[in-house]
Amino acid sequence: MNNFVVSEINELEKKMAGYQFLLNYRYKNLCVKADPMALLSVIVNINGEDKEIEDVADVSTPDDYHFEILPKMTNSLEEINTGILSYHPEFKPSTEQMEEDDPDTQYLVYEMPEVDKDRRDFLTEAAKSLHKECKARIDEIQIEATANFSELFSTNPESLKETKDAISDKHDEAIDAIDDLLEKKLQEIDEAYAHYLEERQEQESVEQEEDNFDFTKGMRQESDE
């Protein structure tokens, strides 16, 4: 395989990898669990100047379903909150105080939206749709490259077969990669749905215990009377 062909195949591999990265980026912004990558596009306007989130705040994830945003500059909470919610209006924000060693400092906490059945269904369909779109783009790259090399090597069947095989290998690797991204995203969605059901069950159990306590207390009061 000559250097020109190798170079061209490397280029199409980069294009396919670009769509893989884009799919992963879209999945991170199809927020289920808290992932700092979902905040990369956030722009915060402070005193008329646009800044990226990492320039104005430290971001942490205390657990799978919360962001903590600690401002680097005083009196910038409102601007940071506006910037984040403009990109992710589905986040549930709250303001918290630092511990006793720094009681005057406030920070933002964002809770990921609950993944109930309706949201699970929406996220699942969205993840599959994004995967389908990405696969179509990768297929197009393979088809176009194969057509171009078929014309170039129309009189050299051995070189054409070698090149087609190389293109097919790169295509299959890219498809395997985005299939893996889809599988992981669907698993993440299912885990968040299970988390939601578990929390609902715990809440219902607490409410049932409270109802039982109130009922028992009421019966005792009637008995005393």
Image: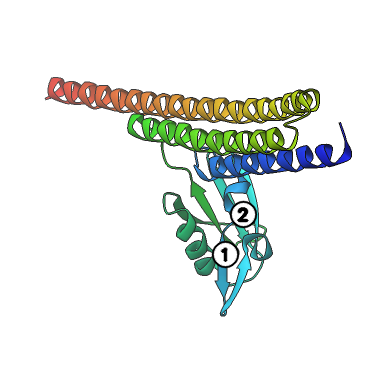
Left or right, 197 with respect to 176, comes to left
Judged from the image, the secondary structure of the residue bearing numbered disc 2 is loop
Q: Residues within 10 Å of mark 1 (few under 14, many from 20)?
A: many
Where is residue 160 shown, x and y percent of the image? 75, 27
Residue 163 is at least partly visible in this image: yes
Left or right, 205 with respect to 11, comes to left
* Of residues 142 and 78, the one drawn nearer to the viewer in this rendering: 142
Q: Quadrant of residue 198?
A: top left
Q: Residues within 10 Å of mark 2 (few under 14, many from 20)?
A: some
Q: The residue under label 1 is which amino acid type? A: Ile
Q: Which numbered tag is attached to residue 40? A: 2
Q: Residue at x 75, y 43 (%)?
A: 11
Left or right, 42 with respect to 124, comes to right
Where is residue 45 shown, x and y percent of the image? 55, 72
Left or right, 45 with respect to 224, comes to right
Residue 207, above or below 76: above
Q: Which numbered tag is attached to residue 43? A: 1
Judged from the image, the secondary structure of the residue bearing numbered disc 1 is strand
Where is residue 130 shown, x and y percent of the image? 49, 38
* Of residues 95 and 21, the one drawn nearer to the viewer in this rendering: 21
**Which image quarter holds the C terminus?**
top left
Where is residue 47 shown, x and y percent of the image? 57, 80
Q: Quadrant of residue 209?
A: top left
Residue 115 is at least partly visible in this image: no
**Which image quarter holds the N terminus?**
top right
